[in-house]
Amino acid sequence: MPKLRFGICGLGFMGRSHFARLRDHPRAEIVAVCDRDPRRRAGDWQEPLGNLDLGANAAPQAALAGVATYETPEELIADPRVDAVLITLPTPLHAPVAIAALKAGKHVLTEKPMAAQVSECTRMIEAARLTGRTLMVAHCLRFWPQYVAIKQAVDEGRIGAVRFMTLRRLASPPTYSAQNWLRDAAQSGGALLDLHIHDVDFVHYMLGMPEAVYARGLQNAAGGIDHVVATYRYADGCYAALEGGWTFTPPWPFEMAITVHGERGTVTWNSTRGDDVLLYRGGTQPETIRPVGDALRAELDYFIDCVSSGRPVERCSPVSSRISVALAWLERRSVETGRTMQLSPRLRAAWES
């Protein structure tokens, strides 16, 4: 079977992280990249990037021999060698670049969040439907080994019925993005839409659609929400508490954590305490689960499988990814109004369609 030929749009933190995994992939190859920065297009990747080690800084001088380099996504999309476009650009560009690529007959894997607005997500879904191309949003927590292990433990009934979840994703301000676009709320949507969206998506993946959302947050002068605490309420009495933000004073370390408590046990992981997932079910010591794997490689493999087989994307469907954007916007509305946002059955059904 021929390799799936990728074009990567954007050579920042996530673009380089995906590049590191696709460079020697047995079922894929990189045939084109684009970035507006001529140094990056020339393979000069010396500046350190990112809030954790995903391989973005492994090669200060990128090996781009045989790879076409372009300044704009439009040029890359027009390259007939490109089968799939991987979008790692600022959030406002996700929808227009994805729609253009789909209309050009390319498959699309785009970084999260799916788009800045729910209406843009809908246009992306419609473009994929009309063109018959594969569209997937790279929600990496659905492939992250520790989160996969926790979901598996819950699905297998090892802690009984879930009573509540807590999730945390905290960092100091991101200062590594090109022209500091992450700190520009008009582009990134603030920590709520760029950072906290990870946990919003995973709660929805685990528990489904809530019936109510309440949030409080810290809004900066530009309107971005840099810290948020939210509670999701479910019809069966289950709830989720989520905290996310990048307002902490440096050198605050990046931290992600998840705890799921059930009627017969508790399962938890914190990135600052090592790789092991701990399962508490009584006794003197917790059980240890040692996940293996690489989240970005796993999501790339899944995308390649879907494209190669013609199967629809189910593990992180575009409709599901649109719901995550909608829930983030509900949190923002709750922060701005101080009110609890109720999700009627009609609204939940409309989002899931």
Image: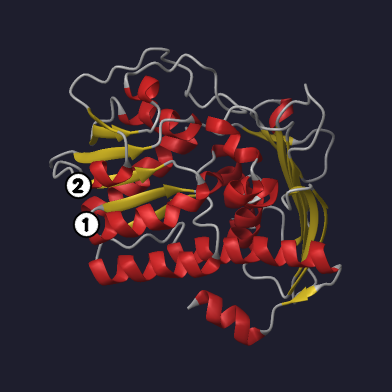
- Residue at 84% from the left image edge and 72% from the top image edge: 339
x and y percentages locating residue 233 in the rendered image: 77, 69
Q: Nearer the viewer, residue 148 or 186?
A: 186
Q: Is residue 316 visible?
A: yes
Q: Nearer the viewer, residue 25 or 17?
A: 17
Question: Mark 2 is on which residue type?
Answer: Ala
- In the picture, the disc for residue 104 is 1
Q: CA distance from mark 1 to mark 2?
A: 8 Å
- In the picture, the disc for residue 78 is 2
Query: Mark 1 near mark 2, Cβ–Cβ under 8 Å?
Result: yes
**Disc 1 crowd, CA 10 A, few/some/many (<14, 14-19, 20+):** some
- Residue at 32% from the left image edge and 40% from the top image edge: 72
Q: Quadrant of the N terminus?
A: top left
Q: Secondary structure at mark 2?
A: loop
Q: Earlier in the sequence, mark 1 or mark 2?
A: 2
On the picture, is 49 further left or further right than 245? left
Q: Secondary structure at mark 1?
A: loop
- Residue at 47% from the left image edge and 24% from the top image edge: 56
On the picture, is 334 further left or further right than 205? right
Question: Mark 1 is on which residue type?
Answer: Ala
- Residue at 37% from the left image edge and 12% from the top image edge: 61
Q: Quadrant of residue 253?
A: top right
Q: Is residue 153 visible?
A: no
x and y percentages locating residue 200 in the rendered image: 65, 56
x and y percentages locating residue 58 in the rendered image: 45, 16
**Disc 2 crowd, CA 10 A, few/some/many (<14, 14-19, 20+):** few
Q: Quadrant of residue 27?
A: top left
Q: Nearer the viewer, residue 113 or 290?
A: 113
On the picture, is 102 further left or further right than 190? left
